[in-house]
């Protein structure tokens, strides 16, 4: 064996060790960006990646809130609530594998997503698929839990306007609340201007036209 080959052979275990170390470090860093209960991006990681997700031209921003979640927690305990959040995380991940969005848990039972939107029909299909998935009953400890969700969405074309994530989430949140007031389902924000806020939160949760589809 030549000296060069011997040097390469000696270096291989060291290189492999560094490779494993780098992989472990990557996994640790990624774990800090994930919500441990749902496996989705946490709020900070979602926000950090949102700007890149909104550079694809026509996009849609979603905010969704689970229906009857507090009732499930109060009736069946926090373990049931955790089980619901875990399953919801799995369902959102599966939806994401089809539609390729950025998905995060904002906190509690509130989630957000960003997808590419090729057309309004495409947005309607994605909303329908998401709602259908979240309305599937969840089995827990012998109980059949019916959760459901209220979903708000807002469309944006970043080729024509600047994306302001805070304003987009606010408008999607308005639309979500409009859906919740009508018994759940989904609602698309049609207004072009963000709703008024007080201390960064929606003012009376007004500003969304209530005549949209459910």
Image: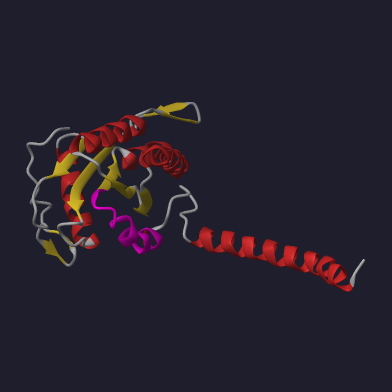
Q: Quadrant of residue 145?
A: top left
Q: Residue at x 49, y 26 (%)?
A: 142
- Residue in the image at 28% along x and 57% along y: 55
Q: How is the image coloured?
A: secondary structure
109 vs 166, nearest the viewer:
166
Q: In this orientation, does residue 35 appear? A: yes
Q: Is residue 175 left or right of residue 74?
A: left
Of residue 90 and residue 9, the one placed in the foreground of this image is: 9
Residue 18 falls within the magenta-colored stretch: no
Q: Residue at x 33, y 40 (%)?
A: 69
Give above or below for 210 relative to 57: above
Using the image as rendered, state which of residue 49 and residue 198 is in the foreground: 49
- 70 lies left or right of 78: left
Give the residues drawn in magenta, as a range: 44-61
**Labels in figure, total:** 0
Question: Vertical placement of 211 versus 196: above or below?
Answer: above
Image coordinates of residue 151 in percent, x first then y, are 24, 41
Q: Residue furthest right?
A: 1
Q: Where in the figure is residue 124, as x and y percent of width and height?
A: 22, 34
Q: Quadrant of the C terminus?
A: top left
Q: Residue at x 32, y 35 (%)?
A: 130
Q: Position of residue 192 (x, y in %)?
A: 9, 53
Q: Is residue 107 visible?
A: no
Instruction: Work out which quarter of the rendered image holds the N terminus and state it.
Output: bottom right
Where, by quadrant of the figure, is residue 148 drawn? top left
Q: Position of residue 19 (x, y in %)?
A: 68, 63
Left or right, 133 with respect to 160, comes to: right
In the image, is residue 45 part of the stretch drawn in magenta? yes
Between 195 and 148, the residue placed more toward the observer is 195
């Amino acid at each position: 064996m030549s000296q060069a080959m011997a040097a390469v052979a000696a270096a291989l275990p060291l290189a492999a060790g560094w490779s494993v170390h780098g992989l472990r470090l990557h996994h640790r860093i990624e774990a800090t960006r994930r919500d441990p209960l749902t496996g989705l991006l946490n709020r900070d990681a979602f926000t950090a990646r949102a700007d890149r997700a909104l550079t694809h031209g026509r996009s849609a921003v979603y905010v969704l809130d689970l229906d009857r979640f507090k009732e499930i927690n109060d009736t069946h305990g926090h373990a049931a609530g955790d089980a619901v959040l875990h399953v919801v995380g799995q369902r959102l991940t599966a939806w994401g594998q089809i539609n390729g969005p950025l998905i995060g848990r904002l906190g509690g039972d509130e989630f957000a997503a960003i997808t590419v939107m090729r057309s309004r029909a495409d947005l309607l299909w994605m909303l329908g698929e998401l709602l259908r998935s979240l309305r599937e009953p969840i089995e827990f400890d012998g109980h059949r839990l019916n959760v459901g969700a209220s979903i708000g969405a807002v469309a944006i074309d970043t080729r024509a306007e600047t994306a302001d994530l805070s304003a987009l989430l606010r408008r999607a949140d308005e639309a979500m609340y409009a859906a919740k007031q009508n018994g759940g389902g989904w609602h698309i924000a049609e207004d072009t201007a963000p709703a008024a806020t007080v201390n960064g939160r929606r003012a009376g949760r007004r500003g969304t036209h209530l005549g949209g589809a459910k």
